[in-house]
Image (spheres, rainbow, N blue to C red):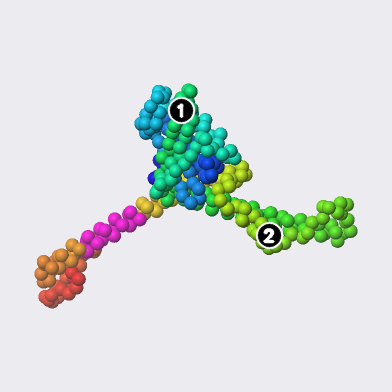
Amino acid sequence: MALSQEMDAHFLKLPWQTLHVGEFSFFTKVHFTETSYCLLVSDLKGVWCEEAAADVIQERSKELNKRLKAPISSFLGHLSQLIRPLLDSKEKTANTLSCTRTRGTLMLHVKSRLSGLPFYWNFHCEESSVGTVCRHFLQPLISMTKALDSQCQELCLLLRRKDEEIQDYLEGGAVLSRERLKTETFDENSFSKSFMRKNIPEQRGTSGLSERLQQLYSDVMVVQEQQEPDVAGAAAHRMSEQSTELSALTERSAAQQDVGDGQTHKPSQVPPGDVLSLTQQPPVVVSKAKKRKAKGLFT
């Protein structure tokens, strides 16, 4: 399932937030309006989404809440008030949300009360298209990784310069007044190995993104959105050039085919003095000195 172009563009600006559903944790993006909603969910093993318009919501509300008579905006407002506080919350939601999975589908079940009556809702999330996964996960995370790597390199360079500065002070006779502030000379390789050994095992699973990483995600997507028009324009220009070249090749191929057909049905004898033209080529005049068969005029 693919998101609509408008919703896809809106979702790109939203950072991933964590939603705990019972014993499961999901990365989630959600957007509610007065007449529709869209949900994008991932557990890092799959990505599912649902984009529901007013007609779908109206039909489903009749099936699940036969005793409730309310406008669509009331249902969506209630769902928004239920879901949004749960994003990035560590609270367990066993009494409010539950989920079931089938092949290619993730169902999120909502159980609550609205106007004193039981309220039920099911989010029917289907597997997202590969394009959606790449745009909302792969491309942003690669960009974030590059940005963080550049930041790390600059910080390592700064630390090495600080060590050189401290060494210069020490050689000039400076003495550290507080021994507890003393640090070892920074070794990038040792630091990297120690960091990986201590931190990588802790990053497994859907633990969520910190506020700093969520902000980095948003910053990366803003830059990508600004660059997309230029990329799209260049791609359109290349497609136009390729289309023009293809048309020219097709015309030349058709002309050569016509010449080949002419060779089959026309005699090879050419009367003296006749002028021949092959697909807009300059005319070839047959010599009048001797009457003989023309060679290679049609081959």
Q: Quadrant of the C terminus?
A: bottom left
Residue 115 lies, with reference to residue 237, above or below; the image says: above
Task: Identify the residue at image location x=82%, y=55%.
Answer: 182
Main secondary-structure element of the magenta-colored stretch: helix
Can I make out residue 58 in this image?
no
Q: Nearer the viewer, residue 149 or 250?
A: 149
Q: Quadrant of the N terminus?
A: top left
Amino acid type assigned to the residue bearing label 1 in the image: Pro
**Residue 94: percent from left, percent from top:** 52, 38
Q: Nearer the viewer, residue 55 or 205?
A: 205
User: Is disc 2 placed on a helix, strand or loop?
Assistant: helix
Residue 50 lies, with reference to residue 179, above or below; the image says: above
Q: Earlier in the sequence, mark 1 or mark 2?
A: 1
**Residue 229: percent from left, percent from top:** 46, 45
Left or right: 30 in relation to 245: right
**Whole-number angstrom distance, CA of label 1 to CA of label 2:** 54 Å
**Residue 199: percent from left, percent from top:** 64, 55
**Total residue callouts:** 2
Can you tell which mark lies on residue 210?
A: none
What segment carries the magenta color? Answer: 242-256
Task: Identify the residue at image location x=43%, y=36%.
Answer: 122
Amino acid type assigned to the residue bearing label 2 in the image: Ser
Q: Nearer the viewer, residue 9 or 275?
A: 9
Q: Which residue is mark 2?
A: 194
User: Is disc 1 placed on a helix, strand or loop?
Assistant: strand
